[in-house]
Amino acid sequence: MDCEKCGNPAVMHAAYSGLHLCERHFCRSVEKRVRRRIREDALLSPDATPDDPETWVVGLSGGKDSVVLTHVLHGTFAKDPRVELIALTIHEGIEGYRDASLDACRDLAADLDLRHEVVTYEDEFGLRMDDVAESDPMGMAPCAYCGVFRRDLLSRYAEEFGADKLLTGHNLDDEAQTALMNILEGDVSQVAKHFDASLGGFDERAEVDEFVPRAKPLRDVPEKEVALYAHLRDLPAHITECPHASEAYRGEIQRLLLDLEENHPGTRHSIMAGYEELAGIAAERYRQGEGPEMRECERCGGTTTRRLCRKCQLIEAVEAA
């Protein structure tokens, strides 16, 4: 099929929109959706000026999603003195995996002339994910530990760098999967905090001081389109699955959504449209003081509802193993 905008050979067909697009118009489409999301979410404050710019920290893992997000953000704001971008990479301590993706992060940051910071689990927590996965003191999937630790470091260092926003590369598939999982699990606190970082303390799985507003500008773009964009732009993305990845439940949800999308194009977009509205309603409930009472973690001082926050509970369990 040919591109419906210019007649050149199409490189993709979006069943949810019916469009066939060539390479040039496809890449423009991805970039347009990211920029539209930035505008609709009002990420750039009207108070930002060249003399007082905003600092945006981007979680850069080296995978396709974070690499594409960083590339598009740079293309959008490289010449805008109102925004300073900082790339932040978390090294979990996974031999043969994160080292390769760290090379991709460094290559991209060098190509774009971006400030690039690297933080490690070993330096911050005194542990490596390879050892955590082997010991598994809580009887959980490695992803459950890793997600808590990573969110803590992203939030903490975003605050340390004086960030006005913390941006992550979650795509449409990621967000639709998480939305459906939260609904099926009846996890109202997770729904409430999904788009509101100030409610991070209500998340018993990741109780940290997430007061730097978070954003996901890539969340309107399907995963396959992110991968195609990375390929067409020849970006240095490290596309390899983590050796410890074992989120069986998410895998079931992923397959369910893929089947639904194939039979009913647009399902993912519809889920997110309704979910975002529900999240706003739930967040307002917690902002009005209907959530659990908060306190300081006795170990790290983070926000929690218990003696120790979830991160510190996990660290203590690993240390005792």
Image (cartoon, rainbow, N blue to C red):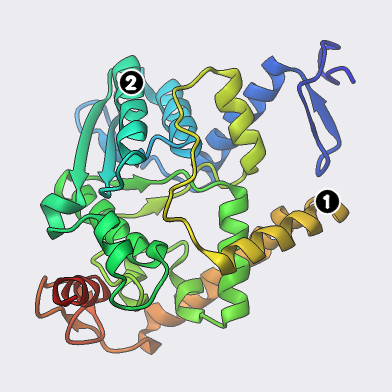
Answer above or below: position of 319 versus 89.
below
Q: Position of residue 74 (x, y in %)?
A: 40, 24
Q: Position of residue 92 (x, y in %)?
A: 27, 50
Left or right side of 171 for 300: left
Q: Position of residue 145 (x, y in %)?
A: 33, 66
Q: Position of residue 11 (x, y in %)?
A: 76, 21
Quadrant of image for the C terminus: bottom left
Residue 229 found in image quarter: top right
Report crowding for label 2: few under 14, some 14 to 19, many 20 or more residues within 10 A (C-alpha).
some
Q: Residue at x 46, y 29 (%)?
A: 237
Q: Which residue is mark 2?
A: 107
Q: CA distance from mark 1 to mark 2?
A: 36 Å
Q: Secondary structure at mark 2?
A: helix
Q: Nearer the viewer, residue 133 or 227?
A: 133
Q: Secondary structure at mark 1?
A: helix
Residue 1 found in image quarter: top right
Left or right side of 88 for 78: right
Q: Nearer the viewer, residue 91 or 117?
A: 91
Answer above or below: position of 70 versus 201.
above
Q: Which residue is mark 1?
A: 262
